[in-house]
Amino acid sequence: NTVQRQTKLAKVGFSTEITCSIDFLDRNYFVIWYKNGKYLFEHEPRMSLNLSRDGRIYTRNEQEDIALLRIQNVSVRDAGEYHCKAVHTSVGKPMFHYWKINVQDGPILSPIRSVRENETFSAQCCVTFTYSTEPVKYLWSIGNPLTTTFSDNFGGNLTCSNVSFTAVRAFHNKLVVCTVENELNSSTHERINLMLPPTMKLQINGHDTNATAVLANGTHVNITCYAIDSTTKAYISWNCNEKTCPSEGSLSNDMHEKLNNATREFFTADSTINYTAMQNEDVICTAGIYGDRNWTKSVKISVF
């Protein structure tokens, strides 16, 4: 009798198929499938060429003398030892073809939390096999390749890779991609929610101001604070010598959203106070952002 043995790597959620080549001179033979020694299905010579049973499709290609078992949606339960047995109806020895299906679950990338600019954070990517396999090579990228990590199977079925990097502005809204390099070459990804701080700017009567402004006593001016292009909404507050700034008239506090291809990308806030110069003091605008972070811009008012 003819015996063939092969191993197949399949992935959870995808399809896979195994074949059984038959070498009889005519087509009067049965094809019987087994899993882990238990009977699955018998394909008689005159049965329909395509039959479905329990999520598996059994096919006979009589022109090429091939029987095929196709699993549509692989799960961990589909791992195991399969074999087909071809038996002629009258003459010849049975033929056997043995397959071992090793099921891969993953790669699975751990969720990546929101991260601030210049913060260092880590990502972990893992893959599980129903049977031990060769060492896995992981490839990481965020647009460009990151450090490649080799990892063994630790004597079992789970293997993981970790990578750490410092978030920079260019990573905003990019994908961290983890690829497991083997015969399946599977990959997965997570989007980086990189929280960018605003660019702070102060203007007096529409003109950019430096760290100091010299004003005559009693001068009325509009001081405007801008918190520009942050990835989180900011609300601006004012402080004069560590107290709430007195203002005449209205206080504006406006938020603007910059849209990119109909997707909210960045926010800009601005606020204006009507200020009267009465004494030397520090005028500070604060943009509250991230819930626990504040960003400030100040001007020192000198009165003469």
Image (cartoon, rainbow, N blue to C red):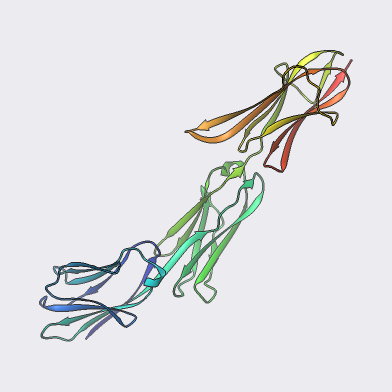
In the image, residue 201 sits, relative to residue 131, either above or below, namely: above
Tell me: 43 left or right of 127: left
Tell me: 57 left or right of 219: left
Q: Residue furthest front?
A: 249
Query: Looking at the picture, how far across and down is residue 34, in whole percent?
Result: 29, 79
State which quadrant residue 81 falls in. bottom left
Residue 118 visible? The answer is yes
Q: Identify the residue at image location x=45%, y=65%.
A: 105
Tell me: 214 left or right of 198: right
Q: Identify the residue at image location x=56%, y=57%.
A: 147
State which quadrant residue 287 falls in. top right
Tell me the quarter of the image containing the C terminus. Answer: top right
In the image, residue 74 sits, relative to residue 207, either above or below, namely: below
Q: Identify the residue at image location x=16%, y=72%.
A: 65
Q: How many marks?
A: 0
State which quadrant residue 68 falls in. bottom left
